[in-house]
Amino acid sequence: MDEKEYNRLWRKRNPERVKQYNKKNREKPGYSEYVKAYKKIWNKNNKHKHIKYYKKNKAKIIQRVTGWRWKNMDKVKKYSSKSVTKNRDRINTRARNRCRRIRIETLRHYGGKCTCCGENHMEFLSIDHMRGNGQKHRRENGISSIYDWLRKSNYPTKDFQILCHNCNLAKGFYGYCPHKKEKNKGG
């Protein structure tokens, strides 16, 4: 039996003495800082162990955490509201950046320019439902962000195109885009 195994068994057999020892140590000045520093170093040096353990026991860990959250919902809500209040600006900035990133990624996937007038400034572009059923589609699927939905649906091309906001609004209000009308008159 090696020293680690011996110590583990001793702690298991003498829980009261371990509690007394820990209590005495906790009362020493600077002990909590020492423990925090030790844990930080240990975690940094043993990250691979955490990853390996998590991969092996992922289902159990998720089940345990979810169970704890359900049992302690009041604590979770209290902590969450404090955390959100404290970090409101950071949370909003991250969400805004994520939405922009997904929007630009989606627009680039569909060509990055208006199919009607050729406008290519990302700020002016939007996704258009080619059949004019955007509101119905959003209601049926409970979509809050069309860009997120397109990304998760692997960018379907059958019913979607890019239009600039002017062309999209004109199509919605009048049923056609003035650019197409001008092209037809000129050609």
Image (tube, grey):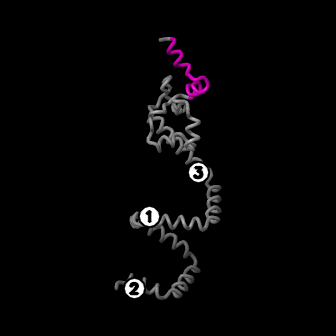
Measure the alpha-carbon separation of dots 2 and 1.
Answer: 30 Å
Task: Say whether residue 11 is magenta.
Answer: no
Which residue is drawn at the image coordinates 50% and 23% (left, top)? 116
Q: Nearer the viewer, residue 106 or 140?
A: 140
Nearer to us of marks 3 and 1 is 1
Secondary structure under badge 2?
A: helix
- Look at label 3 and name its amino acid: Ile
Q: Nearer the viewer, residue 136 or 6?
A: 136
Q: Are marks 2 and 1 in contact (CB under 8 Å)?
A: no
Query: What residue would you read off at disc 1?
Result: 58
Q: Residues within 10 Å of mark 3 (few under 14, many from 20)?
A: some
Q: Residue furthest left?
A: 1
Q: Are marks 2 and 3 in contact (CB under 8 Å)?
A: no
- Look at label 2 and name its amino acid: Tyr
Which residue is drawn at the image coordinates 49% and 88% (left, top)? 14
Secondary structure under badge 1?
A: helix
Q: Nearer the viewer, residue 158 or 164?
A: 158
Residue 85 percent across, percent down from the top left? 65, 55
Q: Is residue 100 above or below residue 45?
A: above
Query: What residue would you read off at disc 3?
Result: 91
Among the two numbered marks 2 and 3 on one chain, the one whose residue lies closer to the N terminus = 2
Q: Which mark is residue 6?
A: 2
Residue 135 percent across, percent down from the top left? 59, 36
Q: Is residue 164 above or below residue 29?
A: above
